[in-house]
Image (spheres, rainbow, N blue to C red):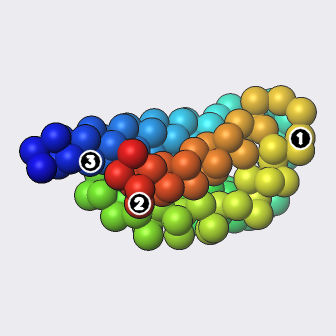
Amino acid sequence: MMQTISTKRNGMLKSAVLGLTAAAASILLWLSFNFANLYAESGDNAHAVLIRTCWTLLLPAVLAAGASWFAKPYLLLASFIWSLPISLYLACTPGIYALFGLTSAAYLIAYLMMRSGW
């Protein structure tokens, strides 16, 4: 009985670390994408891109961090579904921003790990 509880706790810890790492990576990538991107346009369109990517990349990352911290697997799944469309789009682009696809997949893996207790 104690071993089962300990194993489940270790699984939750691993999934939380994965979720928090993916969320932190997404936030850092988002900051780079919006403020250090050499290929980004300036002007009014830059503001629109900032708002759109905030809604589709930054907020799901913040939600994933909270879900990982408080062990709420369904919020991790929501983060994955929410960020999936733009993450798939960015995963098909050359360059570092293709890593958004990896962070989105990490949300799903952390969700599955948290649900199974592995």
Q: Work out which residue is located at the far left of the displayed protein and give it.
A: 2
Q: Amino acid at mark 3?
A: Lys
Q: In the image, what residue occupies the spot 12% across and 50% down?
A: 1
Which quadrant, please, contains the C terminus?
top left
Up the image or down, 22 lies above or below 104; here it is above
Q: In the image, what residue occupies the spot 20% across and 47% down?
A: 4
Percent x, y of residue 82? 62, 68
Q: Check if mark 1's residue and mark 3's residue have beta carbons within 8 Å.
A: no
Q: Amino acid at mark 2?
A: Arg
Percent x, y of residue 32? 64, 35
Q: Check if mark 2's residue and mark 3's residue have beta carbons within 8 Å.
A: no
**Observer able to see residue 66:** no
Q: Amino acid at mark 1?
A: Thr
Quarter of the rendering containing residue 89: bottom right
* Residue depth check, mark 1 versus mark 3: number of the one nearer the observer: 3
Element type at marker 1? loop
* Viewer-side residue, 118 vs 90: 118
N-term-proximal mark, 2 vs 3:
3
Label 2: which residue?
A: 115
Label 1: which residue?
A: 93
Label 3: which residue?
A: 8
